[in-house]
Image: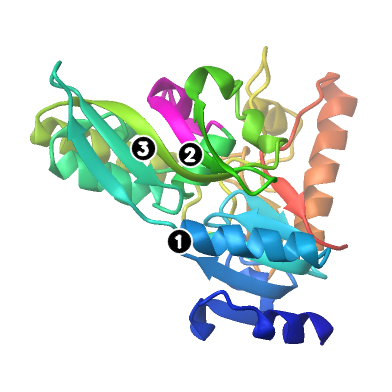
């Protein structure tokens, strides 16, 4: 394969074990489906992603960037070109004069790990977000949220790699946050790290909050099956899961994909589903809800790759 020869000749200084060819994306997505990526690279340094970005541009190779694979559906024929998983980890805490904590976190840090690490140090602000299965970078891109808290409520700024190859600091006011969206969904910038302003709280209180949110998730969400979390966005005037339940689709199945019987807002990989099964169920759900209620529901999950 010509691309493989090109990449093997590149001087990236990335260990070979972090570069995979014809890599099944089902190994890297929470849906546990998806065909192979031509090249799959895990990057742990800003210099690595910058070098790969320039290489892809020079050789006109498609480049896709992902975090933990928890909010995407990769189609069954996979992804052409290079897929980069951002695994840049960092957690630095700075005390402020007013007693608050300024925390710098790498885009590859996982939300749950951050929430629990900070809670152990008596730093609050992330506990509501602990159940979000993605990374910091992915959470910023989609303005992830849970239990009344969103990323926009605590972020101050983000460091990004622009498509020009330059790094830039983007302040919160320029991120254009709205419900499950931000400027990063369309501007091609790759998030490298972000700065958050957080509060000091009693460790035992934070631990209680984490335990309670975990209990609620287990009780209400189908965590025992692969999924991408909430499949559809909440409507401005309606709760999407309630509409899906109302039109009688809870438990409806296409192939191995099912609308969860526990929570109608989740499509799950119940039994060896394909990406085609899942996408067909997504499309069918949108169609039936519109026909029966007149409401148009939108995906929260990003679909990528070849059909």
Residue occupying the point 84% across, 52% down: 280
Where does label 3 land, which residue? 216
Earlier in the chain: of badge 3 and badge 2, it is 2
Asked if residue 271 lies in the magenta stretch, the reply is: no
Local secondary structure at mark 2: strand
Where does label 1 land, which residue? 45
Q: Quadrant of the C terminus?
A: bottom right
Earlier in the chain: of badge 2 and badge 1, it is 1
Residue 22 image offset from top left, x and y in percent? 71, 81
Residue occupying the point 56% across, 74% down: 12
Residue occupying the point 13% across, 19% down: 97
The quarter holding residue 122 reads top left
Measured in 3D between alpha carbons, the distance from the residue under mark 2 to the one under mark 1, in whole angstroms, is: 13 Å
Local secondary structure at mark 1: loop
Q: Residues within 10 Å of mark 1 (few under 14, many from 20)?
A: some
Q: From which residue to which does the magenta span run?
A: 143-158
The quarter holding residue 276 reads bottom right
Q: Is residue 144 left or right of residue 127?
A: right
- Mark whose residue sits in front, 3 or 2: 2
In this picture, is 78 found above or below 120? below
Visible in this render: residue 297? Answer: yes
Q: Quadrant of the N terminus?
A: bottom right
Residue 111 image offset from top left, x and y in percent? 39, 46
Local secondary structure at mark 3: helix
Q: Is residue 253 left or right of residue 129?
A: right
- Mark whose residue sits in front, 3 or 1: 1
Visible in this render: residue 224? Answer: no
Residue 236 image offset from top left, x and y in percent? 67, 14
Q: Residues within 10 Å of mark 3 (few under 14, many from 20)?
A: few
């Amino acid at each position: 394969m010509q691309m493989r020869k090109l990449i093997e000749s590149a001087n990236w200084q990335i260990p070979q074990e972090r570069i995979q060819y014809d890599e099944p994306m089902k190994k890297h997505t929470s849906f546990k489906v998806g065909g192979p990526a031509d090249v799959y690279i895990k990057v742990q340094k800003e210099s690595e992603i910058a070098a790969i970005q320039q290489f892809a541009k020079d050789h006109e190779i498609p480049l896709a960037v992902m975090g933990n694979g928890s909010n995407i559906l990769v189609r069954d024929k996979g992804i052409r070109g290079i897929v980069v998983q951002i695994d840049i980890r960092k957690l630095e805490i700075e005390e402020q004069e007013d007693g608050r904590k300024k925390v710098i976190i790498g885009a590859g840090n996982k939300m749950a790990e951050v929430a629990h690490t900070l809670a152990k140090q008596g730093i609050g602000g992330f506990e509501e977000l602990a159940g979000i299965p993605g990374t910091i970078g992915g959470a910023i891109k989609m303005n992830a949220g849970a239990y009344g808290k969103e990323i926009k409520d605590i972020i101050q700024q983000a460091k990004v790699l622009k498509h020009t190859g330059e790094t830039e600091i983007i302040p919160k006011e320029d991120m254009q946050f709205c419900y499950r969206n931000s400027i990063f969904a369309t501007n091609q910038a790759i998030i490298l790290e972000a700065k958050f302003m957080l509060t000091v709280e009693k460790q035992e209180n934070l631990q209680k909050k984490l335990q309670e949110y975990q209990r609620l998730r287990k009780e209400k969400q189908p965590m025992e099956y692969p999924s991408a979390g909430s499949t559809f966005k909440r409507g401005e005037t309606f709760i999407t899961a309630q509409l899906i339940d109302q039109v009688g689709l809870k438990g409806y199945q296409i192939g191995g994909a099912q609308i969860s019987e526990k929570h109608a807002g989740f499509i799950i990989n119940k039994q060896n589903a394909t990406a085609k099964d899942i996408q067909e169920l997504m499309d069918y759900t949108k169609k039936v809800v519109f026909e029966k209620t007149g409401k148009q529901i939108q995906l929260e999950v990003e679909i990528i790759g070849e059909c």
